[in-house]
Amino acid sequence: MSAAFDLVTADRLVTCDPALATAADPLGVLTPGAVLLEGGRVVFAGRVEAARAAVPAGAAITERAAPLVTPGLVDAHTHAAWVGSRHAEYALRMQGADYEAIAKAGGGIASTMRAVRAASRDEIAAELTQRLGRMVRAGVTTVEVKSGYGLDLASEEKLLEAVAQARAAAGTPRVVATYLALHALPPEAGDRGAYAAHVTQNDLPALAAAGLFAFVDAYIDRSAFSTADAAPLFRRARELGLGVRAHVGQFADVGGAELAASVGARSADHLEHLGPSGADALAAAGVRAALLPVASFTLGQAPPPVGLLRSAGVPLVVASDANPGTAPTESLPLALALAVRVYGLTVAEALLGATREAAISLGLTDVGVLVPGASADLVLWDLPHEAALVQPWGVPRARTVIGRGRVLSGSG
Ligand SMILES: [Zn+2]
């Protein structure tokens, strides 16, 4: 976009602005509405005539219109930095093989680890760049990307450098990197406790010094790492000025939510297994619950206790969990569809969970909303209504995707 100003008008402008939200309209929808963009920022959001009036006389202006405009979607939980394919294992699982049993037999995360260790940084960056491009075409303008398939210092560094390389590529979304420090026990390590201590004392400070990530994550579960393994890691991360997010309660409630709350985590993710004390702890500490319906759908699990989270007052996030095993999709809109269909979220809860609340969980306040001062990250949809975002499953319906004022996908 070369013009000084861009005016985007919509029959339905979904602002996600808390100042416009009401009980009947949690998304703050203007019908019609307009946003005015300049220099990569939103300079006005509101009524169409007021937006036109805000353009200085004689200024160059490009106009676009769509039935529906929303903030760019924010995918706050992905494992998008991988290479290889786990299609054979998927077929086995669909025939009844158990995920935890496959992992114990050297499949699952360990099989992707072998592919990542064998790949070069450029190869990983190239696959990630393509994957991020497909996410953009689905309407995503901000993506959290975790490491965690290297499982040793050099391989994790390579993965995180590949994330930085992909982030710098043209046409990719904004990328927030997370060091998934405790994902699985590598085959060369003997003991979870000793491995966790080594990662905490050696790998975390070494990698943090390079400034390659904003968050530290750990997979806390009955067949993964314990709260005792993860607690020192999270505390060290906070001492280093890093944020914390945690995989919690996917297969069993082992106290991960309480730990996430105690270290001031930004999000606790999965939560298929969560009790009242965990929900209360998350609410009291302002930790967002990141729900990952694609993974539980793939694994045939019961949904997390959404009613408990709601009544405790925990803000909800919905993410794709894009990964080669349990969430074989790159589509955040598919995750939204499943959040509504399988988890019983309202469309407004799901959409806020993939815009404003997801952004807050990543420490970002200028994306996920269309308000003056926000980044010019928005999607023009080929859909009549925000409720339609969760209906035409599986096919991208984003007409034009704009990130930081630039057209990332669609007609310019
Ligand atoms: Zn995950």
Image (spheres, grey):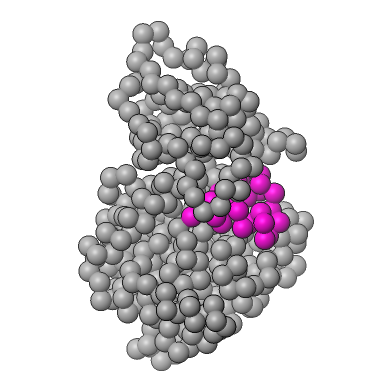
| Residue 262, x across and y down, in percent | 60, 66
Point 65% across, 69% down: residue? 272
The answer to if 197 sits in the magenta stretch is no
Residue 343 highlighted magenta (yes or no) = yes
Rendering coords of residue 194 (x, y %)? 43, 86
Q: Looking at the image, which is closer to me, 186 or 336?
A: 336
Residue 111 sits in quarter: bottom left
> 246 above or below 5?
below
- Taking the image as shown, residue 141 lies to the left or right of residue 13, namely left
Instruction: State which quadrant residue 206 falls in.
Output: bottom left
Residue found 75% across the figure and 59% down from its top: 307
Residue at horizontal 47 percent and vertical 66 percent from the top: 328
- Residue 130: tell me if it is visible: yes
Q: Quadrant of the N terminus?
A: top left
Q: Is residue 85 left or right of residue 247?
A: left
Q: Is residue 372 above or below residue 164?
A: above
Q: Residue at x 47, y 61 (%)?
A: 329
Q: Nearer the viewer, residue 123 or 142?
A: 123
Q: Quadrant of residue 318?
A: bottom right
In the picture, measured across the screen, residue 336 lies left or right of residue 76, that is right
In the picture, the quarter occupied by the C terminus is: top left
Q: Which residues are magenta?
A: 331-354
Q: Position of residue 12 (x, y in %)?
A: 60, 30
Could you tell me how many numbered marks the image carries?
0
The chief SS type of the magenta part is helix
- Image position of 390 with respect to 306: above or below: above
In the picture as drawn, the residue positioned furthest to the bottom comes out as 190
**Residue 268 visible in the displayed image:** no
Residue 13, horizontal then vertical, whole percent = 57, 30
| Farthest top residue in view | 57
